[in-house]
Amino acid sequence: MKGITSSGFEYEINEGIIKDWRFTKAIALADSEDETDKLSGYTKVVQLLLGKEGEKKLEKHVMTEDGMVPMESINREVIEMMHALRQNPESKN
């Protein structure tokens, strides 16, 4: 699945990822009460969703002029991509 977020980030996601056990585990970890687990799970979600190159591309896309990669910007982009993925008929059972 290819898409573009509202900020202009172009991405490509394998629709099958939503059914992948590793992705499910990462989502569950990201939803943990433990902050360390939550961060670990969330970073894994991004890696599985976009791959290493896609993750680097996303970081570059949201990077500020001073070289920072704001977590809230990453969150916004990932949430938008996840919504698009869930709405895609090909990713449904």
Image: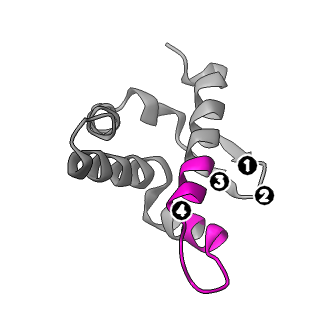
In the rendered view, tell whether residue 83 sits above or below residue 35: above
Residue 10 quadrant = bottom right
State which mark lies toward you, 3 or 1.
1
Where residue 28 sits: x, y (%)?
29, 32
Q: CA distance from mark 1 to mark 4?
A: 14 Å
Amino acid type, label 2: Gly
State which mark lies toward you, 2 or 3.
2
Q: Is residue 67 highlighted in magenta?
A: yes
Verify CB contact (< 8 Å) between mark 2 and mark 1: yes
Regarding mark 2 in the picture, which secondary structure is present there?
loop
In the rendered view, tell whether residue 27 sits above or below residue 75: above
Q: What residue is rendered at 77% in x and 56% in y?
A: 7
Regarding mark 1 in the picture, which secondary structure is present there?
loop
Looking at the figure, which quarter contains the N terminus?
top right
Amino acid type, label 1: Thr
Give the magenta range: 58-76
Residue 54's disc is 4
List the residue tagged with mark 3.
11
List the residue tagged with mark 1.
5
Pick whichever, 13 or 84, lies toward us: 84
